[in-house]
Amino acid sequence: MPVVYGYIADAHDDHINDVAFGPGQAGYVQQLVTYNEAFGKFFGRLAKDGITPKNTLFVITADENDHFVGGPPTPANCDGVTTPCTYAQLGEIDADLSRLLATESGNTTKFAVHADSAPTFYVDGNPGQFDKVTRDLETAVGALFAFNPITGKNDQLTQAIADQQEQAFLHMVTADPARTPTFIMFDDPDYFLFSTGSISPCSPVAPCSNENAQFAWNHGDFQPEITKTWLGLVGPGVRKVGITEDFFSDHTDIRPTIISLAGLTDDYTHDGRVLFEVLSDKAIPVSLRQHHGTFRRLAENYKAINAPLGQLGMQTLRETTSAIASDDATYKAFSARLSDFTGRRNAIASRMIRMIENAEFGGDPLDENAAKQAIDAAQELLAEFLDPQDQ
């Protein structure tokens, strides 16, 4: 069974002149027109070769969305179609973390970062989560500001911080300890942060932040405009439902959905589940059709407690950020609670995904009582950790 993967380059960059386009800019719109024409020719050629949605599954998605960084367009009523947009200011704001830290807090701790809109910090010597050097640096990072050349104002950079315990809850820790960051900073999506290692002070003559017109679309962060993306499916067994936001899904659901539609199985357990909500009745495994309502609740609650962007993932990130900014005793107590909570969550999620996988690919009928018990356990976790306004 042939499987073909392709990656399509972004349309919002001028790949000839190596600069970024803004929304509605003439070059951007023309590039979209060209992409659209190319798609038409591509699918037209496939159809001539007998490759159509009647016999082929097409899956198109984005790995993430991009956040535009720039000033307001001119004219104000431009739409890019009848009236092109132009930008006096366009480009991400690059900022040097080591210089900002030295200038604003006097913190000169040596560290390396993976430069990003959500940079990962690796502190020299690999200190522990509760060590003073880690705590002092996290506190300093949490208080960082940077000058925004687009607005002329100072912006608070840090929006959230994930320590190693929170990374474990969000499934961001691998089997290799050397790859686990000391902590991760999620920052204002207008900024791209790096570190030169320099501790020279920021000044009007030598600013620590500047606009970079080569890039104007940031990603890798946690804001909804970046993380809430789209998935398109068409082919045998897929219903034509149009755009829907009726249920939560993430990228881990794509593979099991493809595998199920293709009638295949894997030799390992997936992290995601089959998106039966968009499949025709005949394409849904019989074991799922028989317990449709319970299975849907099982899948929804599994995602709520286990997905990094699920209810618990976002709430624990917020609470971790607050705990890091508190005193040591409060922070340690919170971390111990989150560690216990992570273990309990993992146990419940493991039970749920086994039931989901066995029903999807093993042909096992869903045990209604066991499923409801797992759903109740997940609901108890949600009630325990979520703020009342989040429920």
Image (spheres, helix red, strand yellow):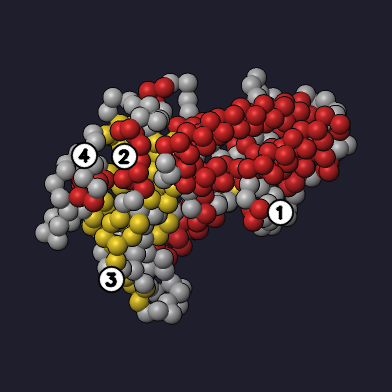
Total number of numbered discs in the rendering: 4
Q: In which quadrant will I find the N terminus?
A: top right
- Earlier residue among tags 4 and 1: 4
Tell me the kind of residue under disc 3: Ala
Give how far apart the Cα atoms at labels 2 and 4 are.
9 Å
Please tell me which residue is depicted at 24% across the width and 48% down the height of the picture.
105
| Image coords of residue 197 (percent x, y) | 20, 39
Residue 246, numbered circle: 1
2 or 4: tag closer to the N-terminus? 4
Tell me the crowding category of disc 2: few under 14, some 14 to 19, or many 20 or more residues within 10 angstroms, Cα based.
Answer: many
Residue plotted at (29% across, 66% down)? 153
Number of the front mark, 2 or 3: 2
**Mark 1 → mark 2, Cα distance in angstroms:** 42 Å
SS label for mark 2 = helix
Q: Nearer the viewer, mark 4 or mark 1?
A: 4
The residue that label 4 is drawn on is: 108
The foreground one among 296 and 377 is 377
Q: Earlier in the sequence, mark 1 or mark 2?
A: 2
Q: Secondary structure at mark 3?
A: loop
Left or right: 190, with 334 as reference point: left
In 3D space, how far apart are the residues under numbered discs 2 and 3 (Cα atoms)?
36 Å
Residue occupying the point 62% across, 36% down: 306
Please tell me whether residue 176 is drawn above or below residue 215 in the rendered image: above
Q: Nearer the viewer, residue 133 or 171?
A: 133
